[in-house]
Amino acid sequence: MPFRVLVTDEIDPEGLALLAAEPRLDIDEEPTLPRDELLARIGSYDAIIGRSATRISPELLRAASRLKVVGRAGVGVDNIAMDVATELGIAVVNAPAGNTVAVAELFFGVVIGILRQLARADASMRSGRWDRSALMGTELHGKTLGIVGLGRIGSAIANRAAAFGMALVAYDPYVPESRFQSLRVERAADLETLLGAADVMTVHTPLTDETRGMIGRRELALVSPGAIVVNMARGGIVDEQALVDALQAGRLRAAAVDAFAREPLAADSPLRRVENLYLTPHLGASTTEAQRNVAVDACAAVRDALLDGELSRSINVG
Ligand code: MLT
């Protein structure tokens, strides 16, 4: 009997083709299913593949009596109850590398957009104006970029920032000295040192108990006045209300947020009304290339786990 695979959320066709080419796999492709429907159906599947929109809750995993693998077409696994998956022996495979470039490029797009007032310039042109003198910008060159989390994405941003002529400082207690040296990034002894040094401060950590609320009211008060704060990692790492308050108090020049504590962001969220807060709807990994990369990586890992028991890409069981 073939293994049954449920593909939920939007997974790039190139990844799906890898599964479809296997006669021993039976694929059901569904859009993001409502929680109850997913719960009712999960018991008949051997694997599920999705993005962050599908929450793989403890309840869902316990109802998934045949489930062997969860495939995450992306890097973050904060939407998956990892401890329960591990307890039940369900392998979780993700795609940690495929969207690194996409996030790094979006970071520079957004920060340069802020520094050069691109959204304002476009809006003013569309309203018939020619606000050339009001739309003076500033440069990345010579500014200090503070990176919290020097993993894949933090490192990719550091590399590119060096090419822009930025000074680099990072805080990451889990990364060896050699990475700081090879990237020519100054190591901040603690988070406070980084906050005080950065003209642009950005977080690139997973969301864990340690990082939830890591940039709160106290930390935002330590950020150099007039700095730009960016959260493209996960909602909740930068406290949203504290960020709104810091912007409204004029402590920050601007902020950019791409990932939110609750997604989709509520239509009436106060975040949508704050001046100098640049919002994007979790677009970090939304490039054709990144979505193809992560779909291929996740689908291949699920296929190999089911058909060959190959678990070298599992991040919880081996
Ligand atoms: C990721 O975790 O890979 C990105 O945030 C995009 C996504 O959630 O799919």
Image (cartoon, grey):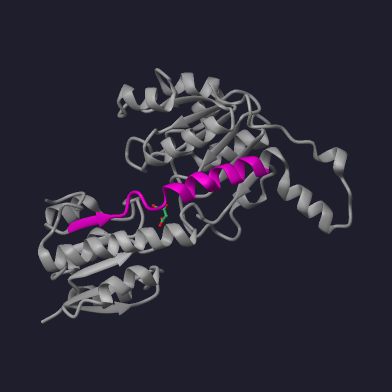
Q: Residue at the spot x=49%, y=39% of the render?
A: 239
- Residue 109 is a magenta residue: yes
The answer to whether 251 is drawn above or below residue 105 in the figure is above
Image coordinates of residue 175 in percent, x first then y, are 31, 29
Instruction: Specify start and end residues of the magenta stretch as a single range.
Output: 91-113
Q: Residue at the spot x=33%, y=61% of the render?
A: 55
Q: Hey, which quadrant is residue 21 in on the image? A: bottom left
The answer to whether 197 is drawn above or below residue 141 in the figure is above
Name of the residue lying farthest toward the right: 129
Quarter of the image with the N terminus is: bottom left
Image coordinates of residue 180 in percent, x first then y, are 38, 25
Q: Hey, which quadrant is residue 60 in on the image? A: bottom left
Q: Identify which residue, 201 or 163, lies in the foreground.
A: 163
Q: Residue at the spot x=32%, y=74% of the render?
A: 17
Image coordinates of residue 236 in percent, x first then y, are 44, 43
Image coordinates of residue 132 in percent, x first then y, are 86, 42
